[in-house]
Image (tube, grey):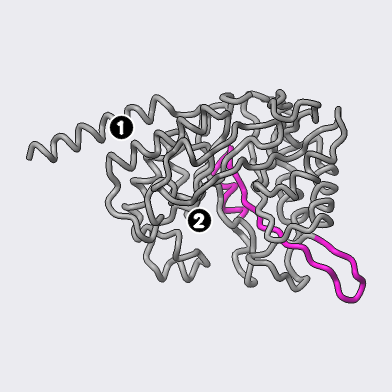
């Protein structure tokens, strides 16, 4: 009885500590928010209906038309598009046009960004990167940017706009999205910092070896850095797990990063099959994932990725009203 009481008190103290560390707001990251397999056309609508701010993940692959030799970037769940998949201009940018134009007119900068676009490049051809950068350039007035400086290891002030674009840790991407930008130009999207391991048995101070830079401003990590084995092998959520999460967030803040953890689902297996969700991200029940959602919200994880947009959104209503000011 005393042991159970002690664990309960310890868990309460952990939650208090996590709350003290919390960021200004926590954002739903709508995982795999695009159509595939001829299904799920309404995912972006479902995500946007949960309210703003919100993050939208788009997976991209490069397709070269065999008839013309012309390449284009397409939204795809995998690496081999056939040319029939939607593109980001139509599915994402033109869909959010009314939201962004209204936001620019209202000019409530303390609420920006309203939408984070999280790009997951499934193919990393330089032509692909250049095509995406050209597309972003067409919408530059919507985008949060930073100046390209002669001191790339020093994060420069951001010019906040309604949309923030994030991409991965690839050094090849950095060449196009940062290195090739002339000094005095604008960085239109921001890469992820290095993560040395995907396992929870690695000391937190070894997980993230480098501080944020002018280009690398966020961390994108699987939940397995919190619980060993990740979702499918997780046991009961414990005080030790909460302490690990708090330490991870403290380290991320120390290095100057935003944090994204992925992907936290909890459902019956058949539900996942019907919805097109990966079994590897499943804690097995809504109750199990809600414990993690609440802990991640309390810890101030900036972007919490899930496929269960509507289930997760009510947990962060208060947080969504706050500005993203920590690393301005």
At which x and y percent is residue 224? 43, 51
Q: Nearer the viewer, residue 269 or 320?
A: 269
Out of 163 and 51, give the one closest to the viewer: 163
Query: Few, some or many C-alpha atoms within 10 Å of disc 1 (few <14, some 14-19, many ≥20)?
Result: many
Task: Residue under label 1, please give it.
Answer: 14
Q: Is residue 181 left or right of residue 261?
A: right
Residue at figure coordinates x 53%, y 30% from the top left: 321
Query: Quick one: which residue is furthest to the bottom in this view?
Result: 67
**x, y (%) of residue 136?**
80, 45
What secondary structure is marked by label 2? Answer: loop
- Based on the displayed image, in which of its 4 quarters is residue 147 positioned? top right
x and y percent of residue 266 in the render?
A: 39, 57
> Magenta residues, as a range?
44-72
Q: Quadrant of the C terminus?
A: top right
Does the magenta run of residues contain 68?
Answer: yes
- Residue 155 vs 36, above or below: the answer is above
Considering the numbered disc 1 on the image, is that residue within a helix, a strand or a loop?
helix
User: Up-down: is 28 above or below 269?
Assistant: above
In depth, the one of 166 and 175 nearer the eye is: 175
Tell me which label, 2 or 1, sits earlier in the chain.
1
Q: Which residue sits at x=64%, y=59%?
A: 34
Tally of numbered tags: 2
Q: Is residue 310 visible?
A: no
| Neighbour tally class for label 2: few under 14, some 14-19, many 20 plus, Cα within 10 Å | many
Q: Which mark is residue 37?
A: none
Q: Label 2, on which residue?
A: 307
Is 131 left, or right, of 236 in this rendering? Answer: right
């Amino acid at each position: 009885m005393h042991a159970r009481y002690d664990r309960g008190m310890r868990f309460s103290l952990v939650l208090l500590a996590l709350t003290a560390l919390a960021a200004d707001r926590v954002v739903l990251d709508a995982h795999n928010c695009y159509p595939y397999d001829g299904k799920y056309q309404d995912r972006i609508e479902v995500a946007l209906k949960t309210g703003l701010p919100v993050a939208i993940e788009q997976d991209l692959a490069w397709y070269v038309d065999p008839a013309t030799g012309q390449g284009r970037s397409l939204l795809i769940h995998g690496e081999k598009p056939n040319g029939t998949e939607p593109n980001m201009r139509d599915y994402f940018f033109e869909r959010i046009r009314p939201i962004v134009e209204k936001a620019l007119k209202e000019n409530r900068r303390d609420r920006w960004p309203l939408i984070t676009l999280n790009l997951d490049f499934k193919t990393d051809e330089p032509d692909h990167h250049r095509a995406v950068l050209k597309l972003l350039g067409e919408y530059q007035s919507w985008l949060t940017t930073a100046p390209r400086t002669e001191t790339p290891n020093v994060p420069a002030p951001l010019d906040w706009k309604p949309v923030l674009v994030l991409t991965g840790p690839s050094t090849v991407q950095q060449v196009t999205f940062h290195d090739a930008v002339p000094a005095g130009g604008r960085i239109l999207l921001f890469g992820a910092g290095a993560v040395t391991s995907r396992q929870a048995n690695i000391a937190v101070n070894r997980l993230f070896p480098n501080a944020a830079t002018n280009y690398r401003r966020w961390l994108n990590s699987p939940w397995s850095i919190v619980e060993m084995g990740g979702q499918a092998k997780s046991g009961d959520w414990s005080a030790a797990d909460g302490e690990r999460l708090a330490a991870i967030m403290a380290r991320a803040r120390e290095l100057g990063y935003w944090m994204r953890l992925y992907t936290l689902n909890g459902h019956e297996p058949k539900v996942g099959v019907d919805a097109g969700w990966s079994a590897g991200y499943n804690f097995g029940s809504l109750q199990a994932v809600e414990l993690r959602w609440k802990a991640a919200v309390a810890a101030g994880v900036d972007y919490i990725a899930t496929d269960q947009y509507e289930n997760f959104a009510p947990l962060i209503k208060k947080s969504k009203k706050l500005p993203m000011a920590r690393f301005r």
